[in-house]
């Protein structure tokens, strides 16, 4: 298992499927090559100051280390986006959440997150 490090790879995965959890969001994307599974970690600034974000990132890395690599699909890139709840959530519960996230079918894809037809037009209409 390799790490994602380049911004372009993170952006490509962000357009893929997602599974939500209280402590993180798991994003995934299938690749067309035969390389190993790659995983990246990110925590936004809205989740706290630098030491808190680093603690969240360390907890997420440890979760992946303890997870069975066979649960990840081959030829995929994954990104774990940390949430503030990762600081206070029980580690065993987070590990169960991650196992479940890897087995769940993806809830949203880039195409499914688009606008609803007619939704923007209805809001911009003038009342009669």
Image (cartoon, rainbow, N blue to C red):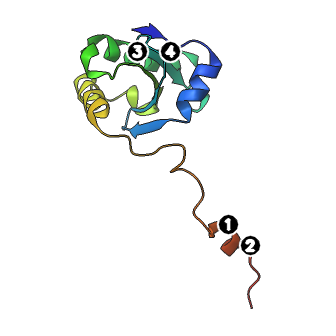
Residue at x 50% of width, y 15% of height? 54
Location of the N terminus by quadrant is top left
Q: Give the image location of residue 73, x and y in percent.
A: 33, 23
- Whether pointer 1 and pointer 2 mark residues with C-beta atoms closer than 8 Å, the reply is yes
Residue at x 45% of width, y 37% of height? 17
Q: Nearer the viewer, residue 3 or 75?
A: 75
Label 2: few (<14), some (14–19) or many (≥20) C-alpha neighbours in 10 Å: few
Label 3: few (<14), some (14–19) or many (≥20) C-alpha neighbours in 10 Å: some
Question: How many angstroms separate mark 1 from mark 2 (CA)?
Answer: 7 Å
Q: Give the image location of residue 69, x and y in percent.
A: 28, 14
| Residue named by callout 2 | 124
Question: How many angstroms separate mark 1 from mark 4 (CA)?
Answer: 39 Å
The secondary element bearing badge 4 is classed as helix
Question: How many angstroms separate mark 2 from mark 4 (CA)?
Answer: 43 Å
The numbered mark, 3 or 2, whose residue comes first in the sequence reads 3
Question: How many angstroms separate mark 3 from mark 1 (CA)?
Answer: 39 Å
Q: Nearer the viewer, mark 3 or mark 2?
A: 3
The numbered mark, 1 or 4, whose residue comes first in the sequence reads 4
- The circle drawn on residue 37 is 3
Question: How many angstroms separate mark 4 from mark 3 (CA)?
Answer: 23 Å
Q: Nearer the viewer, residue 62 or 13?
A: 13
| Residue named by callout 4 | 54
The numbered mark, 4 or 3, whose residue comes first in the sequence reads 3
- The circle drawn on residue 120 is 1
The secondary element bearing badge 2 is classed as helix
Q: Nearer the viewer, mark 1 or mark 4?
A: 1
- The circle drawn on residue 51 is none
The numbered mark, 2 or 4, whose residue comes first in the sequence reads 4
Q: Nearer the viewer, mark 3 or mark 1?
A: 3
Q: Nearer the viewer, residue 44 or 30?
A: 30
């Amino acid at each position: 298992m390799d790490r994602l490090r380049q911004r372009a790879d993170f952006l490509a995965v962000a357009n893929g499927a997602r599974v939500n959890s209280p402590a993180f969001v798991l994003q995934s994307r299938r690749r067309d090559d035969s390389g190993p599974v790659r995983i990246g970690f990110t925590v936004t600034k809205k989740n706290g100051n630098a030491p808190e974000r680093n603690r969240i990132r360390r907890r997420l890395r440890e979760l992946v280390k303890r997870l069975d690599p066979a649960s990840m699909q081959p030829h995929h890139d994954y990104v774990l986006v940390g949430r503030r709840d990762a600081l206070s959530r029980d580690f065993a519960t987070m590990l169960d959440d991650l196992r479940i996230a890897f087995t769940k079918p993806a809830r949203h894809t880039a195409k499914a997150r688009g606008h609803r037809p007619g939704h923007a037009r209805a809001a911009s209409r003038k009342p009669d």
